[in-house]
Every structure is written in C-alpha cells, then in structure tokens.
Amino acid sequence: MVATSRKPHGPGLAPIPDRPLPGTPRELFDSLPPLPGLRAEIIDGRLIVSPVGTPEHARAAMRLFRAFIPIMDERGWEGFSGNVDVCIDGSRDPLEPDFVIAPFDCPRWGERELFSSGLVLVAEVVSKGSTEDDRGKKPEIYARGGVPVFLLVDPLTRPASVTVHSDPKEGRYQVTSTVPFGREILIPHPIGCTLDTSVFEEVV
C-alpha cells in the first residue's frame, strides 16, 4: 500500500543549500525521518510506506520465531521479527521482512540493514494490503538477493497455506513447495528441519 498523508499539506520539499533533493527511491528512503508505526520498503522501484500489521499478523511472525528457537540456539543464529531491514545485494533496495534468521556476523549495509546474501531465511506473512507484492514480487527479489530460503505464510488463501521457496539461481527460486495450515513442510538447506504449520491455525 502506498501511504498518503491525512494531515493538511504543509510546505513542499525544498532544496537545502549544498544538499540536492533525492533523485532515486533509495535516496528518498535514506532521507526519511523515523516513522513509528510504519514500514518503508522499496519494491520494483516504488517507495512503499504501509502500516505495521495487525496483532494476528505479528502473532504469526512470533510463532515462526518460537518454532525456530531450538535450531537458532544450536547453530548460533539470531532471529528478528519485523525490527531490522534487509538490503538486497546488487540493487541496494531495502525491505523489512516479518521474520529473518541470520548468523551473528551477518554483513550489514549501514547500521540497520542486513545484507540479503548473508541471511539464512526470510519470511513474510501475507496481509490484505501486501498480497501482490508478497506473493508475486518478493520471491524474485529475495532470490536475486541470494536469500537461501524464503518462507511465505499466507492466511488469505483458501485453504490458508505455507509456501517454501529455496535454491535461488539466476534470480529465481528453483524449488517451491506448498502445504495447507496443519501439515508439516520441509525447510531445506541451510536449515534442514521440518516445520509444523499447525502453529498458525489458531492465530488467523
């Protein structure tokens, strides 16, 4: 969703001496002030500002976090739920996934953004305002960025489903599998475990 302001329009953007106006979506993103309660991402050249998800949306992301805690503890990985940005290698476009697994020493772009090629897994929870981007755009974006595994929790399909994309090559995931909520699904290398998707049944 592209956000529009509900406040009266104030002064337009004006150049600051010795500081040109942003000329690209990335430059505009970098010039944004903190936006509490909002998520800013660049998807296919569009700067998109959208509200954070509902409690049900956040609950699904946290169920993922809890499910992966044993393997993260075993391998020294870290999990983040909606509180870090990912910088896509190559384009440098920023995204803010709902859940990320990364090694402790994952390379960064600046202070906040983790490089996509250094991640272990990225997950998105589909909401009404993000269906087209989550289902159609982000698998290709994350594959181009070298994310080994992209997991999509989709409570809006009928039946609700979980899809795992893996083995990124030449900008596309080569392997995709989908199961309805309630079934187990394999989370392949570099994780190599089975996820019981029944954890999502009571949160949607």
Image: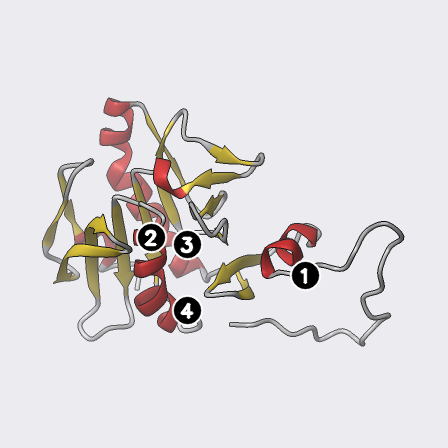
Identify the residue at image location x=71%, y=52%: 33
* Among the 4 quarters of the image, the one containing residue 173: bottom left
Alpha-carbon span between mark 1 and mark 2: 24 Å
Please name the amino acid that badge 2 sits on.
Arg
Identify the residue at image location x=28%, y=33%: 69
Q: Secondary structure at mark 2?
A: helix
Specify which label sits upstream in the sequence, 2 or 4. Answer: 4
Which dot marks residue 58? 3
Residue 78 position, x and y percent, is: 37, 31
Please name the amino acid that badge 1 sits on.
Gly
Specify which label sits upstream in the sequence, 2 or 3. Answer: 3
Name the residue beneath numbered marker 2: 144
The answer to whether 191 appears left or right of 139 in the picture is left
Crowding at dot 3, Cα within 10 Å, few <14 / some 14-19 / many 20+, comes out as: some
Q: Secondary structure at mark 4?
A: loop
The answer to whether 10 appears left or right of 146 in the picture is right
Alpha-carbon span between mark 3 and mark 1: 34 Å
Alpha-carbon span between mark 2 and mark 4: 20 Å
